[in-house]
Image: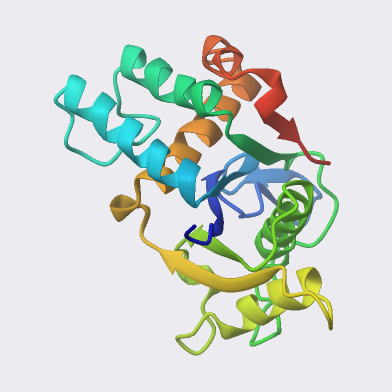
Amino acid sequence: MPKSFNYVFVDESGDPGKPYKTDKGGNKIPTGASLFYILSAVCVDSKKLFAMENRIMEIKGHYSYRSELKAQNIPLKMYKDLLDIINELKIKIYYRLIDKTKYRGTFAVDGKKKLHNVFDEYNLVKLVSFAIKKCRFDKAEVIIDRADRRLLDGRFDNFNNYLINKVNTKTIKIVEFITHVNSEYVNVMQMSDLVSGAIKDDFTGKNKELLKIINKRFLEKIW
């Protein structure tokens, strides 16, 4: 029997920038950054990955949709059908939602530090660590939507080492590979984007119906 592999696909909604800066008078000035940041992790083994890819392609074919799946672009009916795949295949999804107006920690670090965007990288690693332990995965591959802000000297090594050191132990290799990809070419990564978009629409009050499609058994918020 072929060996099954485990995967965690991670995408985000919003941006990790500081939403306000303060002038000399102590007044808050909007920077244009989003007021929220959402990260979602889709956990699948090889069998569910294959099934999920097939179902996504079937639905795209049904709607004659050939573009990348983006929460802000696809028809609402198609969006709902895609989210229902999560219930159909019993896919586990974990997410972290941060209201940046209430966040009191550090956002970014100037210069070449181990982490140059503390807010982004800390929350991403926290989500992956939680998700992978809840799913009881080992020797998993983590696939992350590529973001150049995580590059240092043209490489992702610093971020990858930070994640591995936080998740793996001396005796157990929970994460075996980390891959940074363009979500345009990965259907399951695009599903993660749709989940983040549904969470964002619920949080902002734009559309509270999308998130209700996902059975609560398969969606868990981490704090």
Q: What percent of the width, then of the height, locates residue 182?
A: 36, 60
Relative to 51, is 89 on the left or the right?
right
Quadrant (top left, top right, bottom left, bottom right) of the C terminus: top right
Residue at 73% across, 41% down: 98
Residue at 78% across, 52% down: 130
Q: Colour scheme in the image?
A: rainbow
Confirm whether residue 143 shows in the render.
yes
**In the rendered view, would you say 146 is above or below 194?**
below
**In the rendered view, would you say 67 is above or below 144?**
above
Q: What percent of the width, then of the height, locates residue 221?
A: 75, 34
- Give the farthest residue toward the front: 1
Asked which quadrant contains residue 141, the reply is: bottom right
Q: What percent of the width, then of the height, locates residue 215?
A: 63, 18
Please tell me which residue lies in front, 78 or 176: 176
Residue at 47% across, 60% down: 2
Residue at 27% across, 25% down: 59
